[in-house]
Image (cartoon, grey):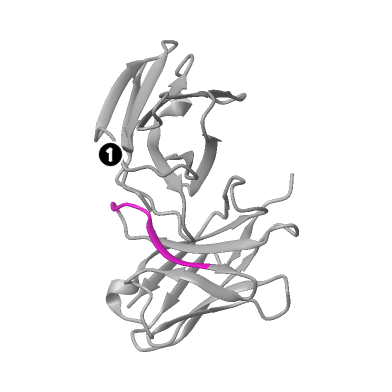
Amino acid sequence: EPEVTQTPSHQVTQMGQEVILRCVPISNHLYFYWYRQILGQKVEFLVSFYNNEISEKSEIFDDQFSVERPDGSNFTLKIRSTKLEDSAMYFCAGQSSYNSPLHFGNGTRLTVT
Amino acid sequence: DAKTTQPNSMESNEEEPVHLPCNHSTISGTDYIHWYRQLPSQGPEYVIHGLTSNVNNRMASLAIAEDRKSSTLILHRATLRDAAVYYCILRGNNDMRFGAGTRLTVKP
């Protein structure tokens, strides 16, 4: 069964550095999402993306964050200047239609030192 | 998205049915009700979803109240592997926001 894949599984970076988290959704997915989960806390919505533009973003998704789907397959989340509090698991999800199930990747653990 | 409320935690015995409730009193007519779960150290995974009618799949059943202001996820025979945090989410606008969910503990 096709899966949503995320790379890398673990990323360590220094505060102030830029990071790019990558996601490869299932080929028929049209709607895309990024979530994050700080250790021990709930899953937080960051952003949704459809038709090559952001549909919705949360208050967490400030100017330091950006998303793009540069080649029609990869879906990326960029954090321009990481902060210690950006340390979390980041999950990508995709949907084939508006009300179909979300398929999640296994996440990228981002550690900012 | 309309808000959902779930109990913080529930316990079940292995091999017994589990009924996980969710209240969504401000649901709109076009909101789908989705359920996901997160096993320890894993990403969320889809369980089931529905609009008005009760739904069954290989993992669980979803019972939706007639007024749609509440729903119940039913695990027919809980196993140790079902220990997870279960999230009830309404799919309305362009986001799908998770609440705090219900932490299900399954006792052998």
Does the magenta portion include A43?
yes
Residue A102: x %, y % from top left: 57, 49
Does the magenta portion include B104?
no
Q: Residue A85, located in which quarter of the rendered image?
A: bottom left
Q: Chain of mark 1?
A: B
Q: Residue B40, located in which quarter of the rendered image?
A: top left
The amino acid marked with disc number 1 is Thr
Give the residue drawn at x 53%, y 36%: B49
Give the residues drawn in magenta, as a range: A40-48
Q: Out of A67 and A1, give the one closest to the viewer.
A: A67
Give the residue drawn at x 52%, y 43%: B45
Give the residue drawn at x 62%, y 24%: B58
Residue A67: x %, y % from top left: 53, 77
- Tell me: residue A7, above or below residue A94: below
Quadrant in which the C terminus of chain A appears: bottom left
Q: Out of A92 and A49, give the one closest to the viewer.
A: A49
- Tell me: residue A16, above or below residue B3: below
Q: Which element carries disc 1, helix, strand or loop?
A: loop
Left or right: residue A68 compared with residue B72: right
- Tell me: residue B101, above or below residue A41: above
Check disc 1: other Cα within 10 Å, few if <14, some if 14-19, many if 20+: some
Give the number of callouts: 1
Quadrant in which the N terminus of chain A appears: top right
Residue A52: x %, y % from top left: 63, 76
Q: Residue B17, located in which quarter of the rendered image?
A: top left
Residue A112: x %, y % from top left: 35, 76
Give the residue drawn at x 60%, y 57%: A94
In the image as oriented, which residue stretches furthest toward the left? B8
Q: Which residue is mark 1?
A: B5
